[in-house]
Image (cartoon, helix red, strand yellow):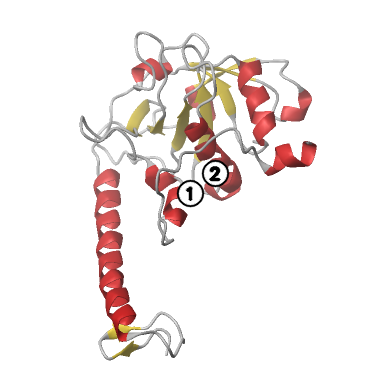
């Protein structure tokens, strides 16, 4: 019965006692879910087809030891170009003669922490909790890093508390990276943002895409909800997402184990 069209309804279970009213509404929902799927595909295609973005400078960040268990020193300076795990083509083609977009992009999440944001953003923290859990999957296709305005020891202390052991954690230091990409204003207030970068065959760095929670004057949040499973799972339930906001108060399994 499951995955069969029976009396106009594509069945989702083998339960024999689902009411006609339920089945009718479930079919209406299924068709809406297909519309949503197709809309997501259209949006993704539009994003992929963006023309070449602006070239950007090779920003400098500050990074600590690979393992959080090794403390916060020594630190090193690392360039944006060094966050890509592939090298530029040794013999770049002239522009317009078959130049191709690199196969591997760099994704950076701008962590809302540091300067005027003296307490780590709970929502950003929830996003990064998720990224840490799927980092090994993402690594098969993209490079990923977390950048915060916070100084490195402060950032890494929060990371230890959350158990972020699979992420590349960077301080923006004195660079204008966060301001240039729109996650920091002139008064040094922070915002959450996700950015994607590419590198041309000749090594030129380009901004490909940035997304923010704010989608417009009348949409001040939810612009990057699709990137986090929390709300997507809550939306499956009768109660929905409601007014849920992430909090630092309920901690993590790491904190519970240490407590």
Residue 144, horizontal then vertical, whole percent: 52, 36
Q: What is the CA distance from the residue labelled 1 to the residue labelled 2?
A: 9 Å
Look at mark 2 in the image and give the residue it sits on: 130
The residue under the point 54% across, 24% down is: 120
Q: Position of residue 38 (x, y in %)?
A: 26, 61
Furthest residue in direction left, as rendered: 217
**Above or below 1: residue 159:** above
On the rendered image, what quadrant is the N terminus found in?
A: bottom left
Q: Quadrant of the C terminus?
A: top right
Residue 4 numbered tag: none
State the residue in front, 217 or 51. 217
Which residue in the protein does label 1 denote?
230
- The residue positioned 46% from the left and 56% from the top of the image is 233
Nearer the viewer's eye, disc 1 or disc 2? 1
CB under 8 Å between discs 1 and 2 = yes
Residue 85 appears in the picture as rendered: no
Please state the horizontal and vertical placement of residue 203, each as a whole percent of the image: 42, 27
Q: Is residue 61 above or below residue 229?
A: above
């Amino acid at each position: 019965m499951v995955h069969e069209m029976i009396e106009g309804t594509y069945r989702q279970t083998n339960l024999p006692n689902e009411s006609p009213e339920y089945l009718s509404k479930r079919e209406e929902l299924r068709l809406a879910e297909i519309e949503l799927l197709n809309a997501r595909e259209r949006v993704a295609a539009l994003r992929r087809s963006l023309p070449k973005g602006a070239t950007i400078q090779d920003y400098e960040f500050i990074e600590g030891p690979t393992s959080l268990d090794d403390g916060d020193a020594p630190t090193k300076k690392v360039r944006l170009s060094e966050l890509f795990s592939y090298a530029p083509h040794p013999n770049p083609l002239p522009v317009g003669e078959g130049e191709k977009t690199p196969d591997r992009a760099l994704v950076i999440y701008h962590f809302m922490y540091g300067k005027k944001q003296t307490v780590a953003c709970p929502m950003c923290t929830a996003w990064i909790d998720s990224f840490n859990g799927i980092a090994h999957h993402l690594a098969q296709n993209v490079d990923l890093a977390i950048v915060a305005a916070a100084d490195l020891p402060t950032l890494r202390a929060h990371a230890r508390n959350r158990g972020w052991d699979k992420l590349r954690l960077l301080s923006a230091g004195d660079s204008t990276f966060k301001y240039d990409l729109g996650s920091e204003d002139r008064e040094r207030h922070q915002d959450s943002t996700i950015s994607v970068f590419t590198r041309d065959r000749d090594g030129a760095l380009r901004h490909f895409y940035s997304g923010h929670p704010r989608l417009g004057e009348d949409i001040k949040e939810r612009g990057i909800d699709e990137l986090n499973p929390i709300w997507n799972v809550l939306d499956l339930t009768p109660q929905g997402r409601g007014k849920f906001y992430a909090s630092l108060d309920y901690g993590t399994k790491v904190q519970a184990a240490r407590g």
